[in-house]
Image (cartoon, helix red, strand yellow):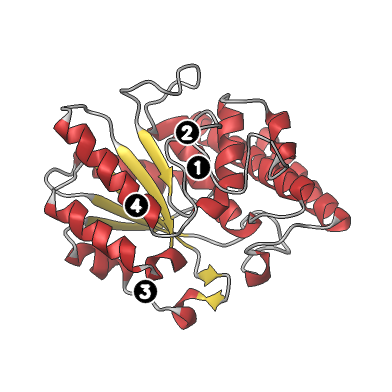
Amino acid sequence: MNSTEKKALKITACKVRMGIIEGVYHAQSGHPGGSLSAADLFTYLYFKELRIDPKNPKDPDRDRFVLSKGHTCPGLYAALAERGYFSKEELKSLRHIGAMLQGHPDMKHTPGIDMSTGSLGQGISAACGMALAGKMDKKDYRVYALLGDGELEEGQVWEASMFAGHHKLDNLCIVVDSNGLQIDGPVAEVGGPQPIDKKFEAFGFAVQTINGHCFDDMEKAFAKARSVKGKPSCIIMNTTKGKGVSYMENQVGWHGKAPNEEQYHQAMTELNAELDRLEAE
């Protein structure tokens, strides 16, 4: 990746973070912490990795993305808006009655959403089914799914992983947003899914661990995942919950809480300053 591409991704990721704050603030509810930790991934997927066309969101040959940790949809919605699936003004209608953007992804009403999700652990199962269907139909699309590290406490995750390994779903790439925090506290204390890499390896995955805020790492990891044959891939991203907003970073309280007016203005001031800095580089 050259410096121009990297700069463009950083700028877009900053705009995605601003979209997250706009959505959650205007909803006065939602999940900013995990949305912000995954903002760089959402950006990389929708601007670099996925084979998609916002003008044809139902293209049967498109790559698929499943947000298994569906509560972090403010991040996904912000990325979809930046990519052109719908107007960025829609972000302010997050969670409003009758609006297109609800508190969890809805494939029937939101362009660009490939699977409705919400109950943790179920998205990866859907992704496995989509990947198997692609193989049965002899399609070359790939399926990506994002899970939270807290979500790994769900037993269904490991049933799905066993299925993926057994069926050698090498068109499936699981990404784990490992920010170390969940709604009740540190993941290591609440449920302890570690060692995450060894567990996915035991279920037959090719596993990589990267810095989830580094686009160079993502480029190498996704390229390697595409080259793996005969087994599914898992990319564990080490991230910071609340990344990009100083008072939210590594604070478990921001797992699911909206900023008040003062906090909203502080967050947007910080992100606008970062955007100005990136554009001046």
The residue where tag 4 is placed is 124
Residue on which the image places disc 1: 42
Name the residue carrying label 3.
193
In the current view of this chain or complex, which residue is farthest to the front?
A: 98
CB of mark 3 within 8 Å of CB of mark 2? no
Residue 199, image quadrant: bottom left
**Disc 4 to disc 1, C-alpha distance:** 17 Å
Mark 2 residue type = Tyr
Q: Are marks 1 and 2 in contact (CB under 8 Å)?
A: yes
Counting residues from the N terminus, which is met first, the one under dot 1 or under dot 3?
Answer: 1
Which one is closest to the eye, mark 4 or mark 1? 4
Task: Sort mark 2 into few (<14), some (14-19) or many (20+) by Cα contacts within 10 Å.
Answer: some
**For marks 3 and 2 on the same chain, the one whose residue lies earlier in the sequence:** 2
For residue 46, which numbered disc appears in the image?
A: 2
Instruction: Please tell me which residue lies in front, 25 or 10.
Output: 25
Quadrant housing the N terminus: top left
Task: For the residues labelled 3 and 4, say whether their Cβ atoms are less than 8 Å apart.
Answer: no
Q: Nearer the viewer, mark 3 or mark 2?
A: 3
Residue 99 shown left or right of residue 49 in the figure:
right
Q: Amino acid at mark 1?
A: Phe
- Residue 203 image-quadrant placement: bottom left
- Could you say where residue 69 lies in the image, as x and y percent from the top left? 48, 55
The residues bearing labels 1 and 2 have C-alpha atoms spaced at a distance of 6 Å
